[in-house]
Image (cartoon, rainbow, N blue to C red):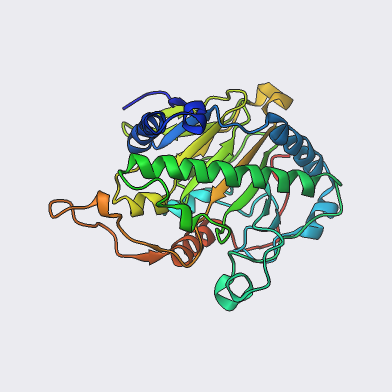
Amino acid sequence: MPQSIPTIDFTRFRSGTIDDRKRTAKELGEAAETLGFAVVGGHGIDPLIGEKLREAGLRFFDLSLEEKIQVRRPRNDQNRGYIPFGEETLVRMAGGDSPPDVKEVFAIGPDNVPDTPYFNGPESYPSFAPNLWPHGPADLRPSMLAYWSAMEDLMRMIGQALALSLDLEETAFDNVLDNTHSSQLRLLHYPPLTKAVEPGQLRAGEHSDVGMMTILRNDPVPGGLQVKARDGTWIDAPGIANTFVINIGDLLMRWTNDRLNSTLHRVAVPPLDVGARSRRLSIGYFVGPRYNAMVECLPTCCSPDNPPKYAPVSVHDYRTKRFAAGAGDNKPFAASGS
């Protein structure tokens, strides 16, 4: 088991031969099968897209609570709008419990979708619940949508590499990641601490991600992302300029019959004496396939000696129930840790 997260350069996957693509895919597959995490460079995305969104996101979280609450999430099964301090306890998704996570969130899903039953019918909720946009900052919405578009390109490239690593056609996941996908973009704000947290409290509790995979723009500050190795040790995720941290989600682990690893991770609490340096804004793109896709064992991941471990389940049914478990109950809140 590696004790650091491997870095994989996708330059040759983007512009090389099929053999180059297969070599890169094999590297990614090895990381996905062991630690379940990788750092991806050479992705071709302009770093300014992420920098602009980080700046706009910080200005949103600098607004008063009264301003942010105007776009508060309407229901706890939605990843939409502003989610205040005290409303998420992610460790509950793994069956545990703790005080609430010390963070606040602003989240969106697909924007400006077609007016058709798939996107607006009764089965589409909450995957296509409407986005809630604040009055300001003025550049927040265009920055989020530009970042969203870049992540769509990246998720499809990563999806093709993962398919090759699983001995599938590289287009195997294309149909569940087309324009019907149900991904979510979350700005995760962890303010610097001004007092000690409660026993067992973290910036984000230990959990695995419920979707297909996650693409994270990591913010390298004290009190950051940590990944749990199979021997129980915690590995700090690196903050390397112009890279993304990729991790496998529960849906992909089920699809691959546990061949790929959806690994527990958390966001640690920084020491109090680091002060403002610990303010963190990470940007997470949580890849969701089309919501009516059935997740059942892929043909290259089972055999008579290795039968499927999981019953088929739809993306909608699995993800919605798991997310709601950690999303809180929308009770009145108080801004803690800020």
| x and y percentages locating residue 136 in the rendered image | 86, 49
Q: Would you identify the image quadrant in which residue 29 lies?
A: top left
Q: Would you identify the image quadrant in which residue 192 lies?
A: top right
Label count reads 0
In the displayed orientation, state which residue is furthest to the front.
17
With 170 as the anchor, is 197 left or right in this view?
A: right
Please give the name of the residue rendered at 64% of the width and 57% of the height, measured from the top-left corner.
Answer: 109
Please give the name of the residue rendered at 66% of the width and 47% of the height, measured from the top-left corner.
Answer: 148
User: In this view of the protein, which residue sits in the foreground, 256 or 310?
Assistant: 256
| x and y percentages locating residue 266 in the rendered image | 50, 38
| x and y percentages locating residue 94 in the rendered image | 42, 51
In the image, residue 192 sits, relative to residue 85, either above or below, namely above
Look at the image and tell me whether residue 152 can be seen: yes
User: In this view of the protein, which residue sits in the foreground, 143 or 137?
Assistant: 143
With 66 as the anchor, is 112 left or right in this view?
A: left
Please give the name of the residue rendered at 57% of the width and 31% of the height, measured from the top-left corner.
Answer: 224
| x and y percentages locating residue 119 in the rendered image | 61, 70
In the image, residue 211 sits, relative to residue 28, either above or below, namely below
Quarter of the C terminus within the rendering: top right
Look at the image and tell me whether residue 194 can be seen: no
With 62 as the anchor, is 190 left or right in this view?
A: left
Please give the name of the residue rendered at 59% of the width and 29% of the height, measured from the top-left corner.
Answer: 223
In the displayed orientation, state which residue is furthest to the left.
305
Quarter of the N terminus within the rendering: top left
